Image (cartoon, rainbow, N blue to C red):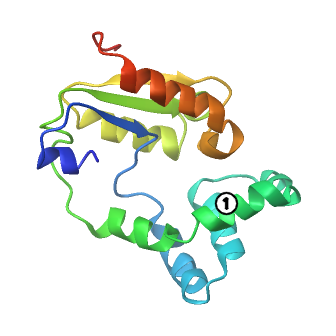
Amino acid sequence: MLLAANELSMRQVIAYEPVMKPFGELALPALETAAATANWSRSVEIALRQVACVSAEDVDYLRSDPQIWNQLCRLSTPSYAELSAINTGPQPDEFARLADRVDLIIGQNNRDKSPYGAAFENVRAKLKKSAVYEMEGQGHLAHIQAPGDLGVLINTLAGDTSSQKS
């Protein structure tokens, strides 16, 4: 949406831990193989270990909960295509030129840390104006680990017409 808002006027864009190139380039060959064989469990493992830099212990913990792991597998199906597009697509000088408002969300656990915190700050630097909201106790998987909290925040931001936070 941040790119789309360079072409289309938008009242508001809400982005959760957006990234831009270079991001996860070294994982592309392995993700391509996993996608070609529809090995979504392997795709999740690659994304978590090689892109998100999640520890082996944390991956094992996520894998131990079949509900979470199955959600991650389902969500990983476009991982290769998305990461490839991020790293090969055009890189504008600015994001969301035509957006009236941009709200960025980051998990507290990723703030000022690689890879997501660093990518987040790179995106933020390409925005003329944005508000940043931090999700306490969360990382990049708030949509899995705290979907209700993330939903409340997004609904609140979408309904909030007051001036932006900085």
Q: Which residue lies furthest to the right in this view?
A: 64
Percent x, y of residue 122: 34, 40
Residue visible at 60% across and 82% down? 34
Q: Is residue 33 above or below residue 51?
A: below
Q: Name the residue under label 1.
A: 72
Instruction: Examine the image and state in which quarter residue 2 appears.
Output: top left
Q: In this view, does 16 lie above or below 37?
A: above
* Camera-side residue of 129 and 75: 75
User: Farthest residue in the top direction?
Assistant: 162
Q: Secondary structure under badge 1? A: helix
Q: Residue at x 67, y 81 (%)?
A: 39
Q: Is residue 34 visible?
A: yes
Nearer to me, 109 or 13: 13
Q: Residue at x 71, y 41 (%)?
A: 145
Judging depth in this view, the residue of 87 and 130 nearest the camera is 130
- How many numbered badges does the structure rendering display? 1
Q: Residue 46: percent from the left, percent from the top? A: 64, 68
Residue 34 lies left or right of residue 65; in this view the side is left
* Quarter holding residue 11: top left
From the top left corner, tell me how far across and down residue 42 is, in percent. Answer: 69, 75
Tell whether 80 sits left or right of 66: left
Q: Which amino acid does label 1 sit on?
A: Leu
Q: Is residue 31 shown left or right of residue 65?
A: left
Q: How crowded is mark 1: few (under 14 residues within 10 Å), some or many (20 or more)?
A: many
Measured from the top left, where is residue 165 in percent x and y? 35, 13
Q: Residue at x 62, y 84 (%)?
A: 38
One can see residue 111 in this view: no
